[in-house]
Image (cartoon, rainbow, N blue to C red):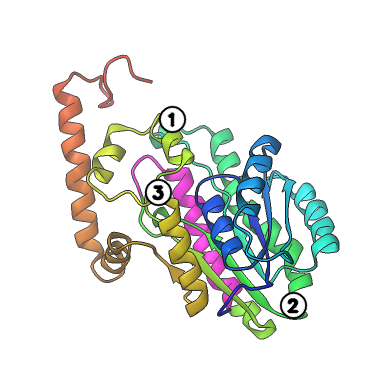
Amino acid sequence: MKDFIGKTVFLTGGSSGIGLATAKLLATEGANVVIFARSEEKLAAASAAIESRRVSAAQRFACRPLDVADHAAVTAVMAEAVQSFGAPDLLINNVGRAVPHCFEDVTFAQFDETMKTNLYGAWSTVSALVPHMKARGGAIVNVSSMAGFIGVFGYTDYCASKFAVVGLSEALRQELRRYGISVSVLCPPDTDTPGLANEDLTKPAETKAVSAGAKLLQPDDVARALLKGIRRGTFMIVPGGEGKLAYLMKRYAPAVVDGIVRRGIRKAQQGTAGAGTDGAGKPRGAR
């Protein structure tokens, strides 16, 4: 997919952050954009922002409320969207949620919700749309994370879901090639989004220590890297120089990555111990 003029794009999680930045950029590239998200209020504001970027009177824009964790709702909403706008040329599965906690503090309910949103949501959307995309081909991008190829302290449920998204995407890539459907996976590093701000509220000290000093990308940076990757047909799209270096190091020098991470964790735990901890190594009075 070398250009997006006249292409129809379905984008889940399009009301804020990376999704909204990508939708606006696609609008400036001449695409027809349909976004999906849970909040109708945010969808309305996002739709107005996206439509303001139109470059042609022929472009079409729309939004649909949708919780991708609800398989039946995904099936119904995507069927209606295809009927109204035709099969998408490009599907971007951008929905994701994370609530960082140490593993023993992650309830099964949280784990279940994370998997349903991050993994099942992508599965449901792809399964609803592939039958319609097969006739003329297209492209699918599933959004994972750097936590989809590097295990991160405090993100056990999130990493499980995002590693799975990478595996799902790699297998889909092999199966859908015969239909002219390319599959990519986007693995952004920490990006300045409302989601990251919420994550910071519950991050363990060790998690903050490991990511301290890392460059924070802006959603627009990630959106540009995403479209560049689609044009090039790149499978693993990792935005930013630091992200690319981390991916290469994890692949070719995993022991080095592990050593860097362990040092950050150890430093944070020593600092916590100096402040006074309980027997489990947590600050006294902490959950």
Tag 2: residue type?
Lys
Q: Which quarter of the picture shows residue 113?
A: top right
| Secondary structure of residue under mark 3 | loop
Q: Earlier in the sequence, mark 2 or mark 3?
A: 2
Foreground mark, 1 or 2? 2
Tag 1: residue type?
Asp
Residue 90 percent coordinates (x, y):
64, 68
- Residue at the spot 47% in from the left edge and 38% down from the top edge: 194
Could you classify mark 3 by the number of other residues whose Cα lies within 10 Å: few (under 14), some (14-19), or many (20 or more)? some
Marks 2/3: CA distance? 33 Å
- Residue at the spot 55% in from the left edge and 52% down from the top edge: 19
Could you classify mark 2 by the number of other residues whose Cα lies within 10 Å: few (under 14), some (14-19), or many (20 or more)? some
Residue 213 falls left or right of residue 195? left
Tag 3: residue type?
Thr
Q: Identify residue for label 2.
A: 134
Q: Identify residue for label 1.
A: 105
| Secondary structure of residue under mark 1 | helix
Marks 1/2: CA distance? 43 Å
Magenta stretch bounds: 152-173
The answer to the question of whether label 3 and label 1 lie on touching residues, with beta carbons closer than 8 A, is no
Q: Earlier in the sequence, mark 1 or mark 2?
A: 1
- Residue at the spot 78% in from the left edge and 80% down from the top edge: 135
Asked whether residue 148 appears in the rendered view, the answer is: no
Q: Identify residue for label 3.
A: 191
